[in-house]
Image (tube, rainbow, N blue to C red):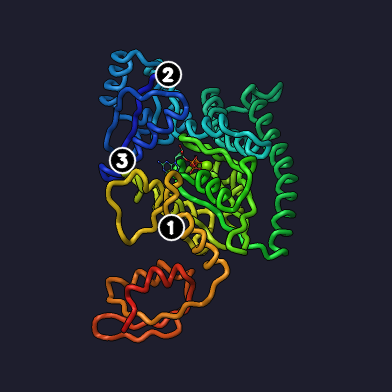
Amino acid sequence: MQKAILAGININKDDQEFQIIMDETKELCLACDIEVIDFCTQKSRRLDPRTAFRKGKLEELKDLIIRHEVNLVVFYNNLSIAMLSRIQKECDVRVVDRTNLILDIFSMRAKTKEAKLQTQLARLKYDLPKLYLEEFDADRQRGGKDHNRGAGETKLEIYRRKIEKEISDINKQLDSLRLSNQERSRKRNESFIKSVSLVGYTNAGKSSLMNLILKYSNKKEDKFVFEKDMLFATLDTSIRNISYDGQSFLLFDTVGFVSDLPHELIEAFKSTLDAVNDADLLIHVIDASDPYFNEQKEITYNTLKVINANDIPVIEVYNKSDKLMEKDEHLRYISCVSEEGIEELLHLIIETLYPKDYALTIKLTYDKQYLLDKYKNHMKITSLENVDDGSIISIVGDKVMFDSLIEYRKD
Ligand SMILES: Nc1nc2c(ncn2[C@@H]2O[C@H](COP(=O)(O)OP(=O)(O)OP(=O)(O)O)[C@@H](O)[C@H]2O)c(=O)[nH]1
Ligand SMILES: [Mg+2]
């Protein structure tokens, strides 16, 4: 395993938030077979335009490199090519940033043709602006004059053109794959089969839940999907037909999310994430045993916003309950190991997809009114009356709404 120093500049984040991101980046390093043996961090209002770190910190980084005899530095922050190459020169080691790490992981994990093409596309799109910049720098060093160029293009220009051509070729191949995916999705929509998509932070247990639901649906093991304790085990969307309790639906397993997922990747994986956009219901799988599960939840909701999927009803499940010492009675726990809560979840999915309407009149004090927003995709408000200490609200909605708001029922 390669050893590295993990460097990061904390711009506008509180200490805990910054710690979470650095820990997450350390996990990303591990997924790339890189062991982080020390940290080098600095608080600052902005990146130093030359070397990201200010001078003193850069000296400290050099000392750490020598002391630990490492030849790699990983930066949490995304750096420009100019910064990367200056730090590389100053420290005499290879320097990579976080987007690079994530792209490396995706390249290692991609198996199907579509995932490979999408990853390649993301990598090329990430490299291209850096090439423009190098070209610009080279141009400037020549004095910005064009008179030497007529005879032939510079090597950089030729390389850039080659990359642009590759991008357009890959886009063409992806377009034809997307067309067949869209055709399949259109057929599914026409057949009115309901679809449910598993979403959540990477390694939360989405694929494990898919496999367990397949087991409850009496599917053979050859239908099972790949699950493993590593980041981004799943890159391709898998679709399975589930039958339970006389009803059926399609279940989609999707790529996991991580904070600041590079936009090149979100863009490249948009068609994969169409499964999420087209779903009638999302199952948000949360790893309740992770001390940072609240932050990971936020990351998932933010990513759903980015891909415009934040209007789809969501059932939150707190997975890995077998690892917990304490539980919160308000949360829906499941375990893919002990199988706690799986049957209840399947019933809830069926009831939400094929709703019997539930009617409820509740009283919410003002501090609880955020619940109306939280469950807005699960219900319709039929009347609302403000009283001294809150509101009395009549609602018609699905089982998720009913189970979540029943404790506020007005007698
Ligand atoms: N103890 C325990 N481990 C679990 C549970 N569910 C999943 N795991 C483990 O968590 C790890 C990740 O599970 P996956 O199902 O691959 O997670 P994922 O969300 O599909 O991950 P990505 O595809 O990488 O986004 C595996 O090692 C699973 O065995 C659970 O309920 N309890
Ligand atoms: Mg998975």
Alpha carbons under labels 3 and 2: distance apart: 24 Å
Location of the C terminus (image quadrant): bottom left
Q: Quadrant of residue 247?
A: bottom right
In the image, which disc is placed on residue 20?
none
Q: Name the spot of residue 217 as percent of width and height, x first.
A: 59, 53
Q: Is residue 265 left or right of residue 190?
A: left
Q: Which residue is label 2 attached to?
A: 2
Q: Which label sits in the foreground, 2 or 1?
A: 1
Residue closer to the observer: 231 or 174: 231
Location of the N terminus (image quadrant): top left
**Does the closest atom of ligand 1 sit within 8 Å of the Cβ of label 1?**
no
Q: Which residue is label 1 attached to?
A: 316
Figure disc tally: 3
Q: Earlier in the sequence, mark 3 or mark 1?
A: 3
Q: Which residue is label 3 attached to?
A: 18
Please, what is the three-letter code of the amino acid marked with disc 3?
Phe
